[in-house]
Every structure is written in structure tokens, then in C-alpha cells.
Amino acid sequence: MLKYELESIEELDDTQKDLYSEKDGRYILNIEGMPEPEDTSGLKNKLDELMSETKAAKQKARELEAQRQKADEDAAKEKGEFKTLWEQAQQRLQEKDEELAQFNQKIQQRDINIAANTIGQSLAKTDAKRAEVLSDYAQKFAKHNGEKVEFIVGGVAVTEAELMAHLSKEYPFLVDGSNASGGGAQSASGSGASKQMNRADFERLAPAKQMAFVKDGGTIED
């Protein structure tokens, strides 16, 4: 059986030798329609070209991936810096809010102290010590609603005069003239009547007369 390609034809007879042609030191069987050996060089060249392009494409892909990673790292770093700045701004804002709250608290406490001291001094004009004690008691019933000082007794809002009446009843030994009675004691109306009044009558008085009654040592009966 004849081979398509041989390195030597010495062993062939003359008839068989005529069927081969020498090409680049090798002997190729002369068969019509068969491609010449050099025709495969084009395929090899194309293969080399594709391999080169593939290598270049892979290199480009690696470069792009490296750029993407760097961009992600830069974005993460920038985001971290922004977060830090935001947290610092929030911290400063919180500090300012706390500072304002403390300042408002001091102002409100000052207003409470003034209101309580006014009540204490009104009830005990002749004795600073008793006035101070009454002021401390008054503070326990006072609170600031954000706009002004108000007084709460037993869960009910009361006026300053009503609080003074309450303190006079609870601590009569601290109030000026609490033991005064008889014809020489003046009532809220200015007459020589007793300095006692039931709560219903007291609440019907105008605020100014309520204040005058309490300051004059009057007491309220429930």
C-alpha cells in the first residue's frame, strides 16, 4: 500500500517511484485533488494570529480588571472619608444641642427659683430662714412648661395664690401671722374678720385678692 508522504523512495520499484514528486526533501504521492503540503501554512499562520490576539485580549482584560479594582478602592476610600466628615458634623451638632438644652435648663431653673423665692418671701417677710424653707417647699410644686413657671398640687394646676394658701395650711408655723386671730386680724376685704376662708369662697376671689389674703396670713379650709 502506497503512503501519501515518504522520506525516501529507494525501496520502491521504478513504476512506484514515478508516482511521487520530491518537495522540500520529501516525496509526495501524486494524487489529483489532494492539497499541497504548503497549503497548511496558511492555517498555521491564522492560528498564530488568533493566539496572539487572544493573548492581547487577555492582557487587556487584566488591565481593565486592575483599573476597576483601583476605582472601587478609591470609591471606598472616598466614601470612608465622607462618612468620617458626616459623623464629625453630627457629633458637633449633638454637642450644640446638648449645650442649648443645658442652657435652657439653667434658664428654666432660674425662673423656678425666682418664683419659689417670691412665694417664700411673701409668706415669711419677717424671717429669712423661714422664707428660705418655704421657697424650698414651693419649688417641689413648681415646674417649667417651656414658656413659664406653673404650679401643680395633687396633679392639678394651681395659681400662685392657691399654692401659697396650700403652703400656709401645710406649714402654718412657717408663715407670718398664721396664729393671728380675732378682731385685730384683717381679712382680704380689709375688715376685722377671721383669717380663715373655705376653698369655695377663696376660689371666687380675684387673683389679686387671693394673693392679698394669703400674704396677710389667711388660711383656707377645705
Image (cartoon, rainbow, N blue to C red):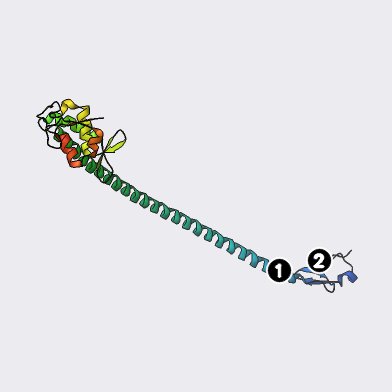
Say whether residue 91 is left or right of residue 201: right
Residue 102 sits in quarter: top left
Q: Is residue 64 above or below residue 146?
A: below
Which amino acid is tagged 1?
Leu
Which amino acid is tagged 2?
Glu
Q: Is residue 58 above or below residue 90?
A: below
Instruction: Answer whether labels 1 and 2 touch (C-beta < 8 Å).
Output: no
Residue 192 sits in quarter: top left
Q: How far apart are marks 1 and 2 (CA)?
A: 20 Å
Helix or strand or loop: what does disc 1 sit on?
helix
Say whether residue 35 is left or right of residue 113: right
The label nearer to you, 1 versus 2, is 1
According to the image, label 1 marks what residue?
43
Helix or strand or loop: what does disc 2 sit on?
strand
Say whether residue 189 is left or right of residue 76: left
Residue name at image x 34 percent, y 49 percent: 88
Residue name at image x 58 percent, y 61 percent: 58
Q: Tell me, for residue 5, which label it has, or none.
A: 2
In percent of width and height, residue 203 lies at 24, 38
In percent of width and height, residue 209 lies at 17, 39
Q: Which of 78 and 115 is in front in this view?
A: 115
Q: Quadrant of the C terminus?
A: top left
Q: In which quarter of the image is the N terminus?
A: bottom right
Residue 78 sits in quarter: bottom left
Q: Residue furthest bottom?
A: 32
